[in-house]
């Protein structure tokens, strides 16, 4: 261990990756302020630092089952601009969970930024569950910027389920996901975002369904409050017999603005592509029903928002 985690470190790790360092097992790599804090590997999972740039290679052996990898990032140094490249090499028929995410504690008036470029190479028949949480805290005038890019290559029969969550303290984010699917592969993406005050969030999904019987399901749930702004873009390319379903649902409140811009291209007669988008305010009857049970209007709004983001 290069440094001893402090109280703030422990709180952030709990929020973004549900980590209790005293009980942490399996493979993990914890990064703080651009440097390695602590690392552990297992016989089936190796973590190697890149030599040409900041980042790591996570190598998971074929047939690895019921193992996990934690790779959270912490930023506490004021004005930090952290860029990291992480590549995941998932062996054939492996079945693993990967927990990432970044937490920023910024007590300055400066901008702290973390940009993570994660690339997944998922071999034939492998299954991955990927969880990525983003969180910010500190000075109310601080700017916390998080720009994650995820690139996914799924080979024959491979699958990846991605869950991303951002609900507090991120001033600005541009979230980009690109995926390229071969035959019989499957990609599921579940995104949840909440913005408030003058925060801005932009998400972009680009998926190529190149293999026969490949499929994807993209689900975005978001809440935009105060004067925040959100943009959602999706571009699905169906290049063979395939299936895609994209859902974008947003609740808009106060003076917020939300845009949803879908694109689906069927480049084969057997491509089956569906897009659904809905943006609206909290229904009055929902508020009335909860308030009739004794909740205040603010309490009722909170319950509806929590339910929507589950």
Image (cartoon, grey):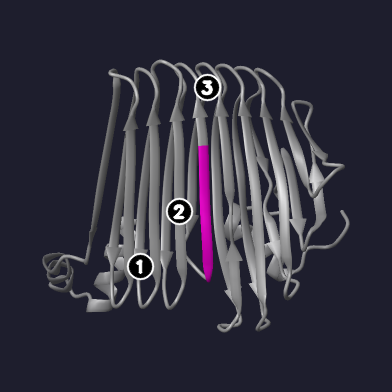
- Could you say which disc has been placed on residue 158 in the image? 3
Q: Which mark is residue 96?
A: none
Q: Rounded to the nearest whole Å, what is the CA distance between mark 3 and mark 1?
A: 34 Å
Looking at the image, residue 76 lies above or below residue 310? below
Residue drawn 58% across and 17% down? 124
Does the CB distance between marks 3 and 1 fall below 8 Å?
A: no
Tag in front: 2 or 1: 2
- Whether residue 310 is visible: no
Tag 2: Cα neighbours inside 10 Å, few (<14), some, or many (≥20)?
A: many
**Can you identify the residue that label 1 sits on?**
224
- What residue appears at the point 45 percent right and 35 percent down from the top-left corner? 207
Q: Which residue is mark 2?
A: 203
| Range of residues picked out in magenta | 171-178
Q: Earlier in the sequence, mark 3 or mark 1?
A: 3
Viewer-nearest residue: 177 or 69: 177
Secondary element type, mark 2? strand
| Nearer to us in this view, 228 or 31 | 228
Within the magenta stretch, is there residue 174? yes
Queried whether the magenta region covers residue 155, the answer comes back as no
Between the residue at mark 2 and the residue at mark 1, the CA separation in whole angstroms equals: 14 Å
């Amino acid at each position: 261990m290069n440094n001893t985690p402090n109280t703030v470190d422990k709180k952030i790790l709990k929020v973004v990756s549900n980590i209790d360092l005293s009980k942490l097992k399996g493979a993990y790599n914890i990064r703080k302020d651009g440097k390695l804090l602590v690392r552990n590997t297992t016989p089936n999972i190796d973590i190697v630092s890149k030599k040409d740039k900041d980042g790591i290679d996570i190598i998971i052996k074929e047939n690895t089952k019921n193992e996990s990898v934690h790779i959270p990032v912490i930023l506490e140094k004021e004005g930090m601009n952290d860029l990291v490249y992480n590549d995941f090499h998932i062996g054939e028929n492996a079945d693993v969970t990967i927990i990432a995410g970044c937490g920023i504690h910024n007590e300055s008036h400066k901008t702290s930024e973390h940009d993570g470029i994660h690339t997944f190479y998922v071999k034939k028949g492998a299954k991955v569950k990927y969880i990525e949480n983003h969180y910010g805290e500190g000075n109310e005038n601080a700017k916390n910027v998080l720009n994650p890019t995820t690139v996914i290559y799924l080979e024959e029969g491979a699958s990846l389920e991605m869950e991303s969550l951002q609900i507090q303290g991120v001033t600005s984010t541009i979230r980009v996901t690109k995926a390229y699917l071969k035959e019989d592969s499957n990609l599921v993406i579940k995104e949840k975002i909440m913005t408030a005050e003058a925060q801005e969030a932009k998400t972009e999904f680009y998926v190529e369904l190149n293999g026969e019987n490949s499929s994807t399901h993209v689900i975005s749930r978001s809440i935009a409050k105060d004067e925040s702004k959100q943009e959602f873009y999706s571009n699905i390319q169906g290049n063979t017999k395939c299936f895609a379903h994209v859902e974008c649902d947003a609740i808009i409140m106060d003076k917020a603005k939300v845009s949803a811009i879908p694109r689906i291209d069927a480049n084969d007669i057997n491509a089956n592509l569906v897009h659904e988008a809905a943006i609206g305010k909290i229904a009055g009857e929902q508020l009335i029903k909860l308030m009739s049970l004794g909740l205040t209007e603010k309490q009722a709004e909170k319950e509806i928002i929590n339910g929507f983001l589950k």
